[in-house]
Amino acid sequence: MVVEKEVGLMKKLSKKKVIIEIIVFLIIALIIVFLIYLNVRIVDDNSGFTLKDDLTAEVYSDVKVKDYIDTIQGDILSFDSIDTEKLGKQEISFIYLNSDDKKRRGTFEVEVVDTEEPLVWVSSSYSTPIGEPIDFEKTVICVDNYDNKPSCQIEGEYDVNTPGTYNLTFVAEDSSKNTFSRDFNLVVYEETVEDDNSKTPASEESGAEVPVTNFSDVLANYKTSDNEIGIDVSRYQGDVDFKKVKDAGASFVMIRVGYQVGTGGEYELDPYFKDNIKKALGNDLKVGVYFYSYADSEKEAKKQAKWVIKQIKDYDISLPVVFDFESFNAFNEMELSIFGLNEVADSFIKTLDKAGYDGMLYGSKNYLNAIWKYHEEPVWLAHYTDNTDYDGEYMMWQMCDDGVIDGIDGYVDIDILYKNSSSES
């Protein structure tokens, strides 16, 4: 009995010792964790840096924390861009190392502002026959970079039923009180009846030929080892002899796959698309396609992109699939900001990119500078000149719309495709 009691006592002492050791271990572990926490924890501290005087950011601009730091004792560890897609104040926090190489969290406030006036394209003078209303909402482009619908008004009185010259002012204002103002004239005139034979076109009087751009001349003057020369076609070129086009030196063709019938309208296949693409591919021409769009929302643009994919999935599309928006006479009524329209285009292009195609944006020089200024996608530049002075990046250049080439009766656009994603003319 005595032995059994001693054994039991030893077991109790041993268990108690184990418990004590566990408690001591846990206490030591907690102390170590706490010390580590004290050593690595990020403390809020604005004393290690100073800020610049201007703590504003232009809407949609690309700004980072470092752009607002004047002096700092250590190094900035946060390099994320600041969200500038919404106007107003926002608190910015960032991590930096102070002079003791300890992490600190700094905070400051940035105000996102819009200082850009609405974009208004208004001519210095307009004219209309007496009694004929003029729709300035469709005649004058009045849009804003941020607002979906800026205030666009005409100041001054005019009467289309009374002949005369009216001095008017077009005024536009956005929600940030940025204002555009420009004077213009409206001439209301009485029509006169003239003998149809009283006038002879100047070209007939002089016997001058209408200037054209010969494809052979473009080949001779622009072809290099870093580019390819081709054309773009739609139903307006009618039946195309692609063998002759190929023999003339073209190496690619951009084909219109279809178009939207106005804002909110249905999608129509170009009546020559299937014939064009089969014959182009059959003559070993590289092929890309474009879709003429009236898309007024990202949802609509995605829907259009999926429709295009369905039409082209059975063909070898080795060149870009292009978003072609030229419906600026309908832009005002779409109630889209310039940034919003850029997002519409991006939606179309990114949907194509995800499907394995190369999405691209089509635009003229003026519209690329004024409207498509927020895009980051490859560009098909339209600028009808011998040497473009567009200073943005572009992958393809539509250099004329008066081209002539064997295989096509009438005019055709001539294009230069560059092997690099950006080019210089």
Image: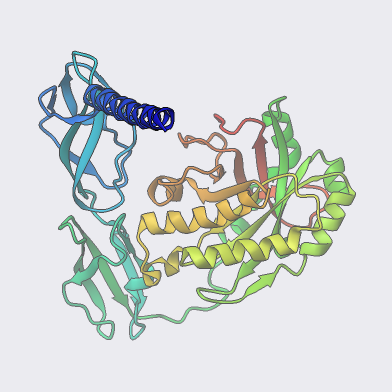
**For residue 328, side relative to residue 80 (left or right):** right
Residue 316 appears in the figure: yes
Left/right of residue 246 with respect to residue 87 in the rendered view: right
* Whether residue 239 can be seen here: no
The percent coordinates of residue 396 (x first, y second) are 61, 40
**Residue at the image position 85 percent from the left and 57 percent from the top:** 278
On screen, residue 66 above or below 277: above
- The front one of 249 and 208 is 249
Looking at the picture, how far across and down is residue 297, in whole percent?
46, 66
76 versus 421 height, above or below = above
Nearer to me, 34 or 44: 34
Report the front residue among 54 and 71. Answer: 71
Q: Quadrant of residue 97?
A: top left
Q: Is residue 259 left or right of residue 242?
A: left
Image height of 162 relative to 43, above or below: below
- Outermost residue to the front: 1
Q: Quadrant of the N terminus?
A: top left
How many marks do you count on the picture?
A: 0
- Residue at the outermost top position: 100
Where residue 308 appears, x then y in whole percent?
A: 67, 62
Residue at 31% from the left image edge and 51% from the top image edge: 85
- The answer to which image quadrant residue 24 occupies is top left
Q: How is the image coloured?
A: rainbow
Pick the quarter of the image with the C terminus. Answer: top right
Res. 22 image quadrant: top left
Residue 24 vertical position relative to residue 107 in the rendered view, above or below:
above
Residue 345 appears at what percent x and percent y? 50, 55
